[in-house]
Amino acid sequence: MNPAPSLRMRGISKTFPGIRALTDVSLDVAGGEVHAIVGENGAGKSTLMKILAGVYQPDEGSIELAGEAVRIADPIDARRRGIGMVYQELNLVPDLSVAENITLGGPPSRFGFVRRKALRERAQEVLDELGARVHPDDLVGSLPVSQQQLVEIAKAYAASPSIIVLDEPTSSLSENEAQALFRVVERMKAAGIAIIYISHRLREVIELADRVTVLRDGRLVESRDAEGITAADMIRLMVGRDITDVFPKREVPIGEVVLKVESLGRGDVFDGIDLEVRAGEIVGLAGIVGAGRTEVARAVFGLDRADRGHITVSGTRVTIRSPRDGVEAGIAYVPEDRKRDGLVPQLTVKDNVALASLGAVSNAGWVRGSAERRVATDRATELGVSPPLIDRRVDTYSGGNQQKVVFAKWLATEPRVLILDEPTRGVDVGAKADIHTIIGELAARGAAILMISSELPEVLAVSDRIYVLHEGRLSAELPRGASEQDVMRAATGEEAA
Amino acid sequence: MSAPTATDRVVKQSLFDRYGTSLAMPVGIVVLLIVGTILSDRFLSISNLTNVLINMSIVGIIVVGMTFVFITRGLADLSVPAMVAVGGLLVLVLDDVIGTWPAALVGLLVATAAGLVNGVLIGYAGLNPVITTLASGTIVLGIAQAFVGGVIVYGQDPVAKDVLTERIFGTVPTIVLIFLLVALMGHLVLARTVFGRWTYAVGGNPHATEASAVPVRRVKAGAFVLTASLSGLAGVLLGISLQAARPGIGTGYEFDAITAVVVGGVSLLGGSGSIPRAMGGLLFVQLLTNIMTLQGVPSEPQGMVKGALIVVAVALDVFLRRRGGRE
């Protein structure tokens, strides 16, 4: 007799305004099974898991838990129904002990008073069952990330779930630390829990998973036994898409080296980064989330401080310790998180455009109003901010227009090097095409462009050359015409580095 | 897979949202003028309104600095009473030693130096502004008390007092002109200079501002240095015009300045507001106080009314923000 699987998701679809996140995705996970879900950034993995966790409601489709159809109203409901989530970002209270964190959801109590002894015993029991070597009395804040990760899993396990979702649990762990985590996963599997395992590390998937589901562009590509699957199989399934978006590439003459980065490193975030970007050249910086792309970009611009290595701009060695130094050196940075690092929402388009170049439109500290207006109007018009009303608050504009305002701000500084971090994220198709045209135009004018994008087709189509990062190090430098498979191999560390 | 963001839609502003907040204060002031005129025949006289202006002047100078603090999202400067005391005490202690005007300069500089400490702790070390200024104010006030021994210091220069209180053109005293000049300068700095632009940007979104190569820490510190030196100036003017000062001379000015800024509709969350708005708030509170005084309302209920006014103003700010969907 075949028991009903612990989890059965059928025909799940979810649309956000303008974005079709999931289309008809089904997933079965049995108790005692490790089911890996793989896919590129944006393939729909997290949306699917957020639906399971009750964060989002699906537009279509059904969810069954142990054969019973359910509607998961919210995260508390999910937890009550035995679904345990362990997210990439840890949700622990650093000032409480390991035992207190593990039992946070429902500490043993009598008359509203926590029974400290019982609490500690319960936590010890959970840790023993998982085989996790963590002391229950230690403060969570004093533990290394790897042990905090185990505490987070123990916390989810303490609620006696039937399903546990592990979202990129090893992304910040070393090889040895990951092994300790795998032992815990094996224990949970032996306890009959259904485990959903999301990871970009394909080797782990091969090692741990019983089944593998591949998502691509919000659709289920394949769901199969992990027996005999290879990394190459998974990569092919993950990227094998029709390129429907057309990214026209403008051919421009490539000039001298403008930006040269040598052995740049910062803590244990990234190390030994060597890059060159020439005038008129668009260089892609690829890699999976967490590979250190944004961190490298921030350090080159000065938002973070690199502690090793050199940066040279147009042949001159520069010391970059702050964004001021970066701008002084002729570098501009269009940030990944537009809301946080790109714009001041309460200010007008004009004030945002002029913010990084007020020195050019002022005299002894006094802003020359007419010069400021001219710069703002010119740049806003040039970049097609529509309508070009420079006295309107910037937060009344759409995402695409806001991104153009960020571009306008940086063009006003007349940079030689432009670092673009996810320049088309969260903008609609029309604005995306506009932004690609702008990038091409900037290259044609001789700017050296370093572009980060999680959309591989975009990187491949726009770039003259591609550097690939894997775990904070360069794993490949690929010429124009490289395939998605080439990039993914280097990005997942499958290429012998 | 990114979730939809609020910025993807174009926010339409109604006429009320666009003009309501900027019209409310002038209308409120006109209403107060009408109510005051109806309630008392002494209200709408040149001598009474001049009195209102004189009463506004000292706190008005402080309001200019406090507005900068609010706009940079620096919450509030609670060291104002200490800086006022420093200015007032130093000018009177030193006036017979080095002369009143050099003494005034010393008072101003010492207050500015104390403000620099605030600025470094808040702007550069990132300490909480409320706690920091509370602490620094207590320390500075303690030093001042130890210095003068807690007694009243009397001035020796009635001529200087006359200079400040002399009525130019027969109506407006010099002290009022100094206040108006400070307010005008503050307005120009905020509206027309690079530092002013930075002030708004820092309060609006410090991350994006830092990423735009703006010296965020310096701007934040600057707001506190400015408030301290303007408070010192207010203390100097107060000392000279009263020819007497004690360590407690500045008590309450921080509260009055915060009240004015808040009632003027300058948000505690930073990034918006202006000197004219804060001045509108100040005028409103002063007129209300004047009317209540003319009606013989005792000072205790007056304090309650001012407190209630703050709550209403802050609640209104929160309400308007929610309406605008800007949170």
Image (tube, grey):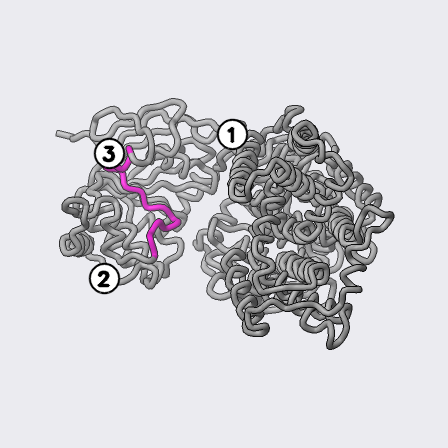
Q: Which mark is residue B76?
A: none
CA neighbours of label 2 inside 10 A, class few (<14), some (14 to 19), many (20+): some
Mark 2, secondary structure of its residue: loop
Mark 3, secondary structure of its residue: loop
**Residue A269 in view (yes/no):** yes
Does mark 2 fall on the same chain as mark 1? yes
Judging by the rendered image, the residue that carries numbered circle 1 is: A19
Mark 1, secondary structure of its residue: strand
Looking at the picture, which amino acid does disc 3 mark? Arg
Relative vertical location of residue A218 with respect to residue A171 in this rendering, above or below: above
Q: Nearer the viewer, residue A252 or B254?
A: B254
Sequence-wise, which precedes: disc 1 or disc 2? 1
Q: Nearer the viewer, residue A234 or A379?
A: A379
In this rendering, the label closer to the viewer, 3 or 1: 3
> Which quadrant of the view contains residue A52?
top left
Q: Which residues are magenta?
A: A77-94
Residue sticking out furthest to the right: B169
Looking at the picture, which amino acid does disc 1 mark? Ile
Image coordinates for residue A154, horizontal then vertical, percent: 24, 51
Judging by the rendered image, the residue that carries numbered circle 2 is: A137
Sequence-wise, which precedes: disc 3 or disc 2? 3
Chain for numbered disc 1: A
Does mark 1 fall on the same chain as mark 3? yes
Q: Is residue A465 magenta?
A: no
Q: Name the residue rendered at 30%, 36% in the picture.
A: A76
